Every structure is written in structure tokens, then in C-alpha cells.
Image (tube, helix red, strand yellow):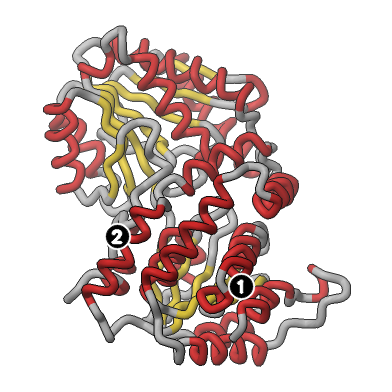
Amino acid sequence: MSATSGASESHLRQPEQGGMHRVLLASDVASAAARLRAAQSVAHDPSRAADVLSRAVALWRDRNYPRRHDAIAQIARQLGYSVALLDDSLDALLKPFGHAALSSLAEKVSRARRTDTPRLLGFIMAGNVAGAGLHEIAIGLVAGAGLLVKTASTEPVFFDQFARTLAELDREVASRIAVFNWGRAREDLSAAMAASCDRLIAYGDDATIESIRNNAAMIGFGSRVSGAVVGPTAMVPERIDAVAEALARDVALFEQLGCLSPHHVFVLSHSTGAARDFAARVAKALERLGDSMPPAKIPLRDAAEILGVRERARWRRIAGESVELFEGPRLEWTVVFEPESIDDNRFMVSPGFRTVHVTGVRDEDQLRESVDSASGRIEAMAVAGDDAETRRISEMLRALGVCYVALPGEMQSPPLLWRHGGGAFLDMMVASR
């Protein structure tokens, strides 16, 4: 399949989405899958794919690159996000896709010489985070698979435009990706995709993943969240503001809707005042970010949930609990502080949109209990401390199943070979058996 025809797949729309476009049929999906398989008759060069990807990412890092500029504007209009927020979020997403990282991946693929990887992958993308899934897309392309990508109805833009960039750079590499868009009601198209692909890779909330769980060939990336730990050595005067600013930025990027967005920050301290002071600094940092990254228009359902978080905090304080609420205007940001975990050391998950819990914990044992309460749901944790604290806490978190441990400010930029969701996709495509 030529790069031109591959890119044009993304133009096919249902009638309600594009007045002059013809109706997308199941046979179109099956034909695209056949062309993707036919493209694999050409010998695959992992280093060539890696080089094209790195060049494409380099273009997309430029905020003035026309495809990026136009895509950001479209996504902002469709999702109600600010352009500044999307620009900063996309910069964070693209950071790990450097030439060296992609070349290293190509070398791993070449050395492994695996013959058991699936030839055709079907990607079902989520709509809440623009570009989510780019790690797996890059790995799949470098590993030589054909990629049939279904974008979300709420965000059909990013992968469509990124595929077009690939096509402009290298027709052969781009012949291994086709991008479509259809809604959930088109079960015939989803069935054609499932029947045509060797494996399905699905992103979204747990309900979305569960709806296709009966497909044994599916790897699902469902609802997962992240958090942070602040050690005593990170709260010294020369560090505390930088740590608070970095974590606030991690919260704000992608409007706190991705699996790498922190929802709960644990402050290791015997001092209630120190933990409370850190919560106040995070609140101030979120307030300042409202100027540089204006917040989104919050959907009604999410706004109701945020109001619920605030009201529960107020009523708990009225009832005599040591809870403190920091809140911005018009639901722009919310910080709920507790001097110690009251609800059985639970890891708290927020509604997103810059709503974060900050809790004091006495020691690492209490921290372990809090993280373990969300076992299987935590994707990443940021850790702030000195080298010894960071190393010790990071080892504990990995033992509890946390996939990615980062520095504050780096949560939204996981390395290319991050073991996303536990690493099942990575092991399938890259790791030798």
C-alpha cells in the first residue's frame, strides 16, 4: 500500500462526520488490512523506520510546524482545552522520542530477530489524551508490524496528522499504517477490524476495555492513575518550591486525564505543618499555571464530581476532621489536604481537571499501605528526595507493581521502552523469549 493511499484511509468518515465523504464500509477496513499485510512483502529495516519516526517527531516538536499547529487548534476546539495546555502537553509526550532512543529500539529489534511477533496490530485509541498510545505505535512500526488505527470520535486528529507526516517523509515506512475513524455504534467496522488483525491494542476507561474483553487477542490499557511521594529532604527551603511547581505541572498536563497524571501526593513527614505547607505550595503553583496554561472547559459530569470533592472536604472539616481545602475560582484547581490518611490509608483518585489530594504519612510503612490499597491501578509515581530516599522508595514502589518511577516534572515523559500497563505489549513486540 502506498503512503498516499495509507494516509487517505483517514479521510473515510461516516455521513454525520463529513458531508461529502462516502460511508465507510466493513470491506474498506478489511481491504486496508490486506494492503497493510501486503506492504510487509518488502523487507523491513528497523533502523529506517526509527529514523523516519525521529524525523517526524522532530517536525512535531516545532510549534510552528503547520500540521502540529492546525492539529492543536482543532483538538482545542473539539475538547475545550486551551492551546497553551495542549502545546505543553504534547511537548512532554514527544520528549522521549529522540533519535538515540529510537535507534536503540531498532538495534534491539534487529538483534532479537523475532519471528513470532504479530504482523498486523489493530489500535483502538482513547479520546481523552491526544497522542496517548504513541509509544506503542512507535514500537510497532520499528518492529515491522502493520498498524490499523481507529481513532476516537472525540479526538480523531492527532494520529491522522502524524501518519500524514510519516507519508511525506517516507512512503514505504508509512505504507505500514492506516488511520480510520468511526463511532462505537459502527459495530460492523469494529468487528471487521477485530477479524482482520492478529492482535488488538485498546485504550480507554475500564468500561471500554471490558466491552471488548471477550477478544482473546486483545491487550487493554484501561483506567490507571498515578501519584507522587515527597521525602523529607525534598522539603528543605532550597528545593520545596521547585518540587511543588514540578508536581503541579505533572497534574495540569493533559488536564490530569491520562494514566500518568498524579492524583494523590504523599508527604513523608512527622510534622503536620510541613505537610500542610507543601500542600499550600502546590495550590499556589496550580494557581500560577492557570495563567500560562489556562484550564479547560470542564464537562458537566466532571464539574459535578469536583464540586462533590470540595463539598465533602468542607463537611468533613465542619465535622471536626483535620481536612483543609484549597480551591481556585470556577473549579479551575482543587487541593484537598489531610495531615494523615484517615480512610484506611486509601489512595485517592480524583475526577481530574487539576484536582489533587495531598496527605501526610508518618513513615514508609504507611506509604506502602496507601500505595498497596490501589494495587494494579497505579501506573506511575514521582519520587522527590535525596539519592538514598529516592532509591529506597523507588524499589518499594516497583515491588508493589508501579510500572514507572519518575522525578517530579517528568511524569508525562516516560522512556520509549516504559513497561506501560505491566509490559505485555513491550514483551510481545521487543523482548526476546
Residue at point 52%, 37% (across, down) = 253
User: Which structural element holds mark 2?
Assistant: helix
Three-letter code, disc 1: Val
Residue type at tag 2: Ser
- In the rendered structure, the answer to whether residue 426 lies left or right of residue 366 reads right
Which of the two residues, 340 or 193, is positioned nearer the viewer here? 193
The spot of residue 148 in percent (x, y) is: 54, 77
In the rendered structure, the answer to whether residue 407 lies left or right of residue 249 reads: left
Can you see residue 135?
yes
Task: Check the image and report above or below for 371 versus 379.
Answer: above
Viewer can see residue 319: no
Dot 1 crowding, Cα within 10 Å, few <14, some 14–19, many 20+: many
The residue drawn where x is 59% and y is 90% is 30
Question: Percent position (x, y) of residue 431?
Answer: 23, 69
Q: For the residues carrying marks 2 and 1, which lies nearer the camera in this image?
A: 2
Tally the marks.
2
Residue drawn at x 64%, y 34% is: 84
Whether the residues at callouts 2 and 1 have beta carbons within 8 Å, the answer is no
Quarter of the image with the C terminus in it: bottom left
Residue 179: give its label. Answer: 1
Q: Is residue 123 above or below residue 247?
A: below
Q: Secondary structure at mark 1?
A: strand
* Mark 2 closeness class: few <14, some 14–19, many ≥20 residues within 10 Å: some
Q: Quadrant of residue 369?
A: top left
What residue is pinned by disc 2?
Answer: 104
| Quadrant containing the N terminus in the rendered view | bottom right
* Marks 2 and 1, the one that precedes in the sequence: 2
Mark seen at residue 349 = none
Residue placed most toward the observer, 422 or 139: 139
Q: CA distance from mark 2 to mark 1?
A: 27 Å
Q: Position of residue 189 (x, y in %)?
A: 63, 83
- Work out whether 240 lies above or below 92: above
